Amino acid sequence: MSALTDQTVLLTGASGGIGMALCEALVKAGARVLAVGRNEQKLRELAAQHPFGKVLWVKADLASPDGPAQVVAAAERVQPTPSIVVMAHAQSAFNLFEDQSPEMLQQLVQVNLQAPMMLVHGLLPLLKRHANASVVAIGSTFGSLAFPGFAAYSATKFGLRGLMEGLAREYGDSALRFQYLSPRATRTAFNSPQVEAMNREMKVSQDDPADVAAQLVDAIVRGDRRMQIGWPEKLFARLNGALPGLVDRNLIAQLPIVRRHARS
């Protein structure tokens, strides 16, 4: 029997590439999933792929200020209520910072940072009713290593990592766990054609979403506070903390490639 058997998991971003793979892996591990996403058709299809009642769904737009409250209300209606929250939603943006509109910057902060903060804040009373509960943020390598062309996106992921690290320490003497788990580049529609072209030119490895989901579910079960998937991403994330100047020089040398694809 899996540690997730009969647990209710609230999963945001469930209609996205990694989110759909995560839903599959969670159900396979015995969980019941409350899937949250913006695409109603994909959510309906996701629920239909699994035994009746294993995947419930709620349509909510976390780019909207009202989105988190809608998700919290849905979580309170489900019985048993979620004991695990997996935040896999995200807004991507590959542009040079000066080319991004104020509206895009505001949306990045709303989706990637403010929505997770409001979700966790609203769900805490519900989670604390359980003997054991977990909040899992699906982060990014760029939450530990800011990359040119992704400055604003990186800033929101750094903020998300800080939120989870702070909460893990704030609740460190309780049964409530906070986990920040970071995939590297993954083969999903999350990446724009420009990002895909840049990744090919820079020979960036990309993982299969099903493989990523399996690693994430294993980390959730283990209770890992932090995890970075992939090599050399794991090395570069650590180097950026210890020797940022070394990483600076490496990334600055690649600026011509980044600029060309960002403005293509």
Image (spheres, helix red, strand yellow):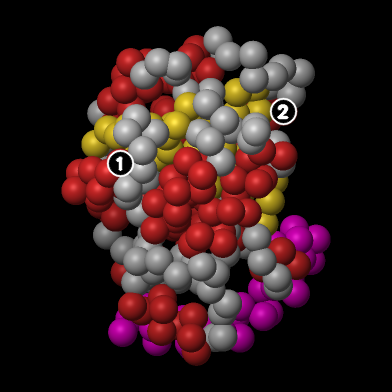
Amino acid under disc 1: Ala
Residue range of the region highlighted in magenta in the rendering = 237-264
- Depth check: 40 or 142 in front? 40
Binning the other alpha carbons within 10 Å of mark 2 as few (below 14), some (14 to 19) or many (20 upward) gives few
**Mark 2 vs mark 1: which is more N-terminal?**
1
Please state, as top left, top right, bottom left or bottom right, where the C terminus lies in the image. Answer: bottom left
Query: At numbered mark 1, what does the secondary structure look like: helix, strand or loop?
Result: helix
- Depth check: 225 or 129 in front? 129
Q: Is residue 160 left or right of residue 221?
A: left
**Which quadrant of the structure image shows residue 169?**
top right
- Tell me if residue 23 comes above or below residue 122 in the rendering: below
Question: For the point 47% across and 41% down, which residue is it?
Answer: 27
Task: List the single residue furthest toward the left.
Answer: 41
Q: Is residue 243 left or right of residue 158?
A: right
- Tell me if residue 124 comes above or below residue 44 in the rendering: above
Q: Is residue 9 left or right of residue 49?
A: right
Question: For the point 70% across and 72% down, which residue is it?
Answer: 232
Q: Nearer the viewer, mark 2 or mark 1?
A: 1
Binning the other alpha carbons within 10 Å of mark 1 as few (below 14), some (14 to 19) or many (20 upward) gives some
Mark 1 sits on what residue?
Answer: 47
Q: Position of residue 247 (x, y in %)?
A: 70, 73
Mark 2 sits on what residue?
Answer: 169
Amino acid under disc 2: Arg
* Mark 2 and mark 1: Cα distance apart in space: 36 Å
Q: Position of residue 251 (x, y in %)?
A: 61, 78
Q: Is residue 255 magenta?
A: yes
Question: For the point 49% across and 62% down, which residue is it?
Answer: 209
Taking the image as drawn, is residue 11 in sight? yes
- Depth check: 123 or 220 in front? 220
